[in-house]
Every structure is written in structure tokens, then in C-alpha cells.
Image (tube, grey):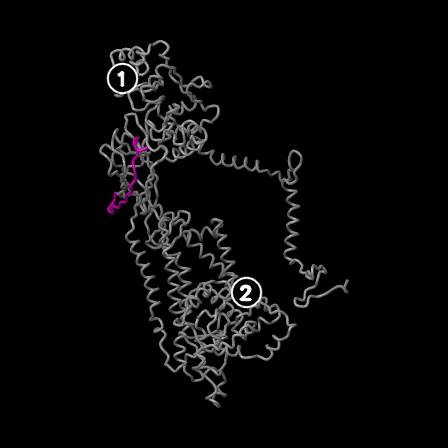
Amino acid sequence: MSVSEGLDSSQGAAPKRDWGGAVESLAPDPVAAKRLADPKRPPPSLYEKRKAVHNKRIDGPFRRFKWLVMLVTLGIYYVTPWIRWDRGPYAPDQAVLIDLANRRFYMFNIEIWPHEFYFVAGLLIMAGIGLFLVTSAVGRAWCGYACPQTVWTDVFQHVDRFFDGDRNARIRLDKAPWRASKTARRLGKWAVYLFIAFWTGGAWIMYFADAPTLTYQFWRGEAAPVAYMTVAVLTGTTFWLGGFMREQVCIYMCPWPRIQAAMLDEKSLIVTYKDWRGEKRGSVKKAAKNPEEYGDCVDCLQCVAVCPTGVDIREGQQIGCITCALCIDACDKVMKDIGRPRGLIDYATLEQCEKEAAGAPPQPAWKALMRPRTFIYGGIWGAIGLAMLFALGARSHTDLTVSPDRNPPFMLLKDGSVRNAYTLRLRNMEARPRDMEIALQGLPAGALMWTDRIAFEDASSSQVIRVDADATRLVKAYVVLPEGSATGNFTFTLTSLDEQRESDSEETSFTGPGDI
Amino acid sequence: MADNKRIDEPTGTEFVGHEWDGIEELNTPLPRWWLWTFYATIAWALVYVVMYPAWPLVSKATEGVLGWSSRGELAQELRDAQLARAETFELIAATDLTELSSNPELMGQAISGGAAAFKQHCVQCHGAGAAGYAEYGYPNLNDDDWLWGGELSEIEFTLTHGIRWEGSDQTRFNMMPAYGDFMNAGEIDALTAHALSLSGKAQSSAQGAQLYDQNCAACHMADGSGSQELGAPALNDAIWLYGDDPAQVRAQIAQPRHGVMPGWSDKLDPVTIRMLAAYIHSRGGGEATIEEPSDAEPIASESVQAAAADKAEADERL
């Protein structure tokens, strides 16, 4: 690796803590030194070809936890759009629906309108802070367990295993020449990739329309072109990112690991190799002969073999490690087989590692969570969540906005009275039509109001207007004041004429000839 | 030329052979993909020249085999837009004016179409807010004072035939005599005072009342309420087309100004005129507004159940 050449110069800095793997690559290599000294050496290549990862099957507590997470996340993804939720005759009965055409977002008993997008913004902020919280507490747990890239890569790696066998068989097949059987296996595997990718894209669009209707339309070729386009794009990206790019997405494409690198500190839980216990590596036989010289690591490379991103955790913390903890499972199994204590590779903080190296006993991982940062992030996260819940509970389903006409600002009528016109926007956010009363407050006696749909003969100081279910209605309202009345600010009040008696009001102004 | 081939040691690249002050050029050819893209653009350009207008000639450019032009495209888009509106236009043309306002959706479309036409044809005199210009005598279209009638059909007639417009035999026409030609200043002052007294703005006199009854009441009516049939403005209200200052009223009696509005029958199609009428009528002063029929009736619980049943049925069909 060309990086090791660069590291040579830093050798004099004497790292405080030396990681087993890193120490090896830092050791002076006579061949490399000679190559470096050669003035005619070719320039170092900045490109490194990808080494395919053929991770081995492993079983253990973390693997089982990963199975569970996969089941839950994929379950949520595929099942959610099919959950029904009765909202009455005027609203869709899909529990989670992002209705872009009608600009509504439904989530169980919550309905979000475009002007309430701050709820979605709040959710995104919570998701962001949630990631901070998780990262500072348990390191890259998101990457290791719940990230869609991780979950789908895991699925595709199991497809590999199903078609081509476990690690060694896959390596052999990779190197084998392209013959009929290999071609058949590959085509079969890619067909399954494509199938999974298609269902991934297909499930996505279900969030944006009534799922049963859309499915029916989709297969009859009647769905909107954007549905087919979306499915095609997501099928393509899933096939490519999950089937072929895999860990390269995490290492090269994703910004999140880089951001996380800045958020981890010596108190964050990470997957670590306990070098003071493992070094110097040697076989069981060697260690039996010379117990003083050798550590617990038998250099069996099982931790590398099971790694879905193909890193060697014994080289220490690195960008390629998504902390999926499969190496812990692998190492614990080997340690159990050779009768040594588990946890040579384990979740620990760097701080704890130093303490353990100095002779302190191992500490349970949950203790690492007990620190201010966890509580501060958790507190912020919870506060935003509570504030949003409160706002959701307290929000009104009736809304009024008023804008006075500016051209002309007022109108003189035959009898000398003065008329102003206003554009009222009445929002009924309930899933049923409602009658709403719009009333004038704060105008002198004799003020009358009528609208573009109510004749002047029926003018009065308040009007009842029907607003359709889950709709906004624009009303042109005319207000007239008798000749010589005082003008100025007043208030429109909107009240729903049902049991809820919700109301909203907005102040506006009445302009007369004397005001200009 | 193999003898001249020299290789730059550090990079392993061949020299071209050009040298400036000891700096030599290396032969690093363009990447293949770049070249192929370049050739593809040349091929595309050839196709383009044949298909589309390309070479500028003396009077016009070569036309291209597709016959495309930006004007042609615009014309096509306009035709398409017209076609898309055709159904609504036909419906508006076929609907009786008295029934137009009882169809809220169609009325809404007519008002929108009228608003667009108003911006193009009417704002020059009546203003963007349709408030007119008092100093020029362009009437306000938002108020409830109508010289020639404020019902939809009356507005449509005025729009079609104009006012004192030479282009139509049916144009709205009247002519107030210039009283300055045969009355003395005192008589005109008395008339002015009487006209203003009808809306309580001045003190009338016996002479003024008598002159009014003899000369004005025939059109403007004894109480000054005017006549929409004759186009005689009401004098007993607060709205004065040419101003309510005594000097302005006096000038209007002595040497009246007569506004002219062109009829639009020769420029606009009947549907556009009808939509303009709907728009002007909707500005707040229109007479004989018809209420939206379904507005006030409460939704009975049966209708909610019926809607639910309809929906369940629709769901089942899927």
C-alpha cells in the first residue's frame, strides 16, 4: 500500500499508543526503503484497484442482532405503505402517504399541509441530531446496522452466498475462467439482484400514492410516467450500489463517515482490537511453547474474513470500519474454541482501551454511554420532539389569511359609503366540509360585509361560508362603512361552526378617502 | 523518424520536438473518449444543418428539411392553447347570461378569461384596478354607479357596441346640450347649485329648481336619480364622473364633455366580450348578483354516509 510509504516519515513521532497492525506496517522495510531510494522509480500510483470482498458466513449475537435489524428495517420499508388508516370519506385511507399532487403529507393521525412544513423540517433536524446522539454514544452504529446501504449490501451478500457458496468458493469462482456454469451462476445471481432492486424501487413509489391502486395501475401500464421513471432509477441505483459498489459507497462516496470522524472522540464506543492482549500474534502451538512472548491473537484472520467492508480491524480505527461488529462474533468464536476469554476484539472506547492496557478491568459497554454529551444530544433531541408534539397537539385546523386589495385601495359608493375589498384565504384542515363564520370585529357600527358569492342585499356583519373538506377557499370579501365612519385597523375572525368551534383571526386595515 | 524519438525521463512521455527557452513540449494526446465526443458533435452538426434552419442567406436562412421555425412553433403553441380552451369558450358562448352566474365553475373561468382580456384591452383607460381616472372622465368600474346599466347583459351590450362609437348603429348614445350657449352665467350658477343640492352639497334656489325642472328633469329625473336607459347620470349620489367641485359641475353644464368608448365587436370575439362582462360585473358593483346555490345548505349526515358508501364501492372495484 502506498500509504505506508508516507507513514515512514512519521515514525520518529513515536505514537503514544501503537496498534498491532499499524506497528507492522511502520516497521522499516528494507525492500521498500530501497525502492524509495531508487531515483528512477515510477511515480507512485494514486489509484488503487478495488479488492472484491468475499465475506465469510458467521453466526453470533451481533450477527443475530443484524438479522433482527434487517428484518425490522426492511419490514418497515415494505409494509408501511400498505397499512390502512380510516380518515373518513374525504381523505385517503393510507396510513403513511406523501401526496405530492394534492400537497398533503399523511402519517397515521397526523396530516401536514405545505404551510406546516416546519414539522417535516423538525423531523429532519431530529434525524440529524439523532445521528449525532448515536454517533457520540455508540459510534458508527447507524453505519453498521441501520443504513440502507448496509442493509441492502447485506442482502446482496447473502444472495452471493446462496449462488456461489461461502468465502472460499466465491474467491475460487471469481478467479475461475468464464465457462457455462460460471456464466449461468452469474446471470442467475444478477437476475436475483435485479429482482430485489426492482422491488426496492417498486416499494418506494407506494409512499406517494394509494398503494393498491398504484400497484394495479402499475402492472396495467396506466400509472404516471414518473412512477415508472422512479422505479427504473431506483432499480438501477439499487442494482449498482447494492450489487456492485457496496463498501465503496461507504469508503469513497458517503460523506457521513467523514463527518463522523470529527464527532468521535476517545469516549465514543468503537470496535477495537485490544492489541496489548493480542500482540505478539502467534499460533496456539507457539504460544504454548513460549507463553511470555505471544499474546492472545492467533492471527487466524477470521476477523478479516467476515468483514463486509474487507478491513483488518487489528490495524485500528479506520474509515472502512462501519462497526457492524461481525469481527467480534468471529473472534469470540475462535477464542471460545481455543479456550481463551472473549473480547479480544470488542466494543470499547479508546479511553477504556488505555486503562485496560494499563491493567484496569474491562468495563461494561453501557458505562461508556454515561457522559454529558449523550445527555446533551439526547436532551436537545427530546426537546425538539416534545416541542413538535406539543405544536401538533395545539395546532388549529382552521386558518385564515387576509390581504386587502391595493388597487384601488377603497371605493366610493353611490350613497357616499366607502367600500374596501379583501382576499380571504379560508383553510379547512379537517377531512370533512365545514361551515365557517367569518365576522368583522373592531369596525364602527353599520359596517357590512358581503362576498363575491353573496349578494349585496344579504350583506351583514358576518357571513357563513362553506369550505370543502381538507381544502382552501379563496373568498373576495367586500366591507362597506357608512359615510363619515372612522377608518383604521380591524379584525376578521373565522370560526368553525361545529363542535370544535375553532377560530383564527387576522388584523387588517380599512382605508378611506381621508387615509390617502 | 524513429531516430528523433526522445523520451522524457521522469514522466516516460515522448517529446514533440518544440522547444522554447529550454522548455520542451511533451506529447500528451487528447484522451480517446474526448476525441470521439468531438467527432460525434461534428456528425451531429452535419445532421443539424440538414434538418434545421442553419445557413444565413441574403433574405432568409436555409429552411431545413424539418421545416421548423421559432415563429411556427409559437403559432402551433397558440393553436394548441386555443384548442385547449375551445370547450370552455363554447360552453360560455352557449350559456345564457342569466344562467352563467349560477354555474360557479364556468363563471370562475369566465372571470379569469375576462381578467386577462381586461389587462390587454381595457387598462389603458380604466386602469389596472378598474378604478378609472376621474381627471379624464374614465369611469370607475368597481362601484355601484352604472351610467348604462350594471347587469351582466347591459355590460355585455355596452362592451359590444360602445358608447358614442361610430362603428355601431346600436351604440349607446346621448348628447347633453351645452347650456352655456343659451343660458347666462347667473342661470348656470343657479342650475349648478340645484344640481349639487340634490345630494346635499349646496343650497338650491327657486330659479335653480325651475330651470332644472324645465331643462334637466326629463333625463336626470326630478329627484336627480338619472336614467340608465338614457345614460343620464344620477345627480343625487356621491359619485361624480367629472368631479363634484362647483366649478367642475358648472363647466359640465355649460360645455359638457362626452366620453367615447369604442365598441369591441370588431376587435374581440363574442366569448371574450362575454368574459369581460363577467369580470367587470365581478368587481364588486355588479347589479343583480345571483347567489351560489349550494353554498348555504348544511351537509346532512346521510350525504356523508352516501359519500362514504361511494368511496367504499370505488375501493371495492379496485
Q: Which mark is residue A188?
A: 2
User: In the image, residue A312 lies at what x, y percent?
Assistant: 49, 74
A48 relative to B237, above or below = below
B272 relative to A373, above or below = above
**Mark 1: which secondary structure?**
loop
Give yes or no for residue A512 being in the magenta stretch.
Answer: yes
**Which residue is nearer to you in this view: A503 or B17?**
B17
CB atoms at circles 2 and 1 under 8 Å apart?
A: no
| Residue under disc 2 on the same chain as residue under disc 1 | no
Q: Which residue is outermost to the bottom? A: A289
Give yes or no for residue A297 being in the magenta stretch.
Answer: no
User: In the image, residue B179 lies at what x, y percent?
Assistant: 35, 12
A228 relative to B2, above or below = above
The stretch in magenta equals A497-516
- Picture quarter containing residue A362? bottom left
**Which residue is nearer to you in this view: B30 or B62?**
B30
As drawn, is A460 to the left or to the right of A50?
left
Badge 1 amino acid: Asp
Q: Which residue is outermost to the left? A: A445
Camera sees residue A420: yes
- Mark 1 highlights which residue? B223
Q: Which mark is residue A470?
A: none
Q: Which residue is outermost to the front? A: B21
**Which residue is nearer to you in this view: A57 or B285?**
B285
User: In the image, residue B271 lies at what x, y percent?
Assistant: 44, 28
Mark nearer the viewer, 2 or 1: 1
As drawn, is B299 to the left or to the right of B51?
left
- Picture quarter containing residue A119? bottom left
